[in-house]
Amino acid sequence: MNRHIKLWSFADVDRSGKVRWTANELGYQIEEERIRPGDHKTDAYRQMNPYEQIPTAEVTGKLLVESTAICVMLAERHPEAGLIPQDRETRELFWQSMSTSSSTLEMPAVLYYLSRAGFIDEAWQELWSDSLQRRLKTFAESMPAAGYICDEFTLADICAAYSLRIGVQAGLLPMEGRLEAYLRRCMARPAAQASRFFDQLEA
Ligand SMILES: N[C@@H](CCC(=O)N[C@@H](CS)C(=O)NCC(=O)O)C(=O)O
């Protein structure tokens, strides 16, 4: 199968990073289309992504939206890569982790981070700081002492690493101990490096 993906993104660090890393794990050739913030609200972009959000992807002529869903769709096309575990017990842990990182943590973490950096209203920080910090800490403490969330590396690690990285960058999580060791295992992966997923964390 021809492994080619076209990816519309603002930058390395936005949610396109999850798709870029997944595509690199699967050996895809990535054609990147960078757009300027604001251009995601044009008619031309809205025709591809009616939600006016980054990322959008095109794979085998099909337009895909929603970063986590795009990652799942890619992983499902290549079950032999094991990015989605097969056995039921491991899948339960996998989907719980995917849901925690992509639903419970990701949006508030991004809003908190953008608010702290002065891009959006500072009220977001106050609204989220207590519950978000506690939930991020709980999630970070559940990271494995060795290996990955489902023992073997899966998509759950890519989605977890996205919310955890933002938590560290936003000053909500200290980069130390078990969390640091886990993130460094993720950072050592060639596909993560090719995706520049952690570059800002190292800067
Ligand atoms: N749930 C969506 C969220 C996408 C999202 O919020 N993307 C941001 C960039 S990371 C964006 O497009 N922001 C501009 C806007 O919402 O106007 C996904 O995962 O794809």
Image (cartoon, rainbow, N blue to C red):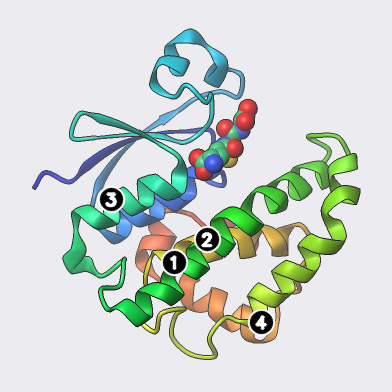
Gap in angstroms between the C-alphas marked 2 and 1: 6 Å
Looking at the rendering, which quadrant does residue 151 occupy?
bottom left
For label 2, the crowd category at 10 Å Cα-Cα, with few meaning under 14, some 14 to 19 and many 20 or more, is some
Q: Is residue 66 above or below residue 145?
A: above
| Residue carrying label 1 | 95
Gap in angstroms between the C-alphas marked 4 and 1: 18 Å
The residue type indicated by label 2 comes to Ser
Q: Nearer the viewer, mark 2 or mark 4?
A: 2
- Residue farthest to the left, as pictured: 1
Of the numbered discs 4 and 1, the one sitting upstream in the chain is: 1
What residue lies at 45% left-to-right and 17% top-to-bottom? 45
Gap in angstroms between the C-alphas marked 2 and 3: 17 Å
Q: Nearer the viewer, mark 2 or mark 3?
A: 2
The residue type indicated by label 1 comes to Trp
The residue type indicated by label 3 comes to Leu
Horizontal relation, residue 31 to residue 66: left or right: left
Of the numbered discs 2 and 4, the one sitting upstream in the chain is: 2
Kindly state the secondary structure of the residue where label 2 is placed: helix
Kindly state the secondary structure of the residue where label 3 is placed: helix
| Residue carrying label 2 | 99
| Residue carrying label 4 | 141
| Residue carrying label 3 | 74
Q: CB atoms at circles 2 and 4 under 8 Å apart? A: no
Q: Tell which of 78 and 180 is nearer to you.
A: 78
Instruction: For ligand 1, give the image quadrant.
Output: top right
Q: CB atoms at circles 4 and 1 under 8 Å apart? A: no
What residue lies at 36% left-to-right and 62% top-to-bottom? 191
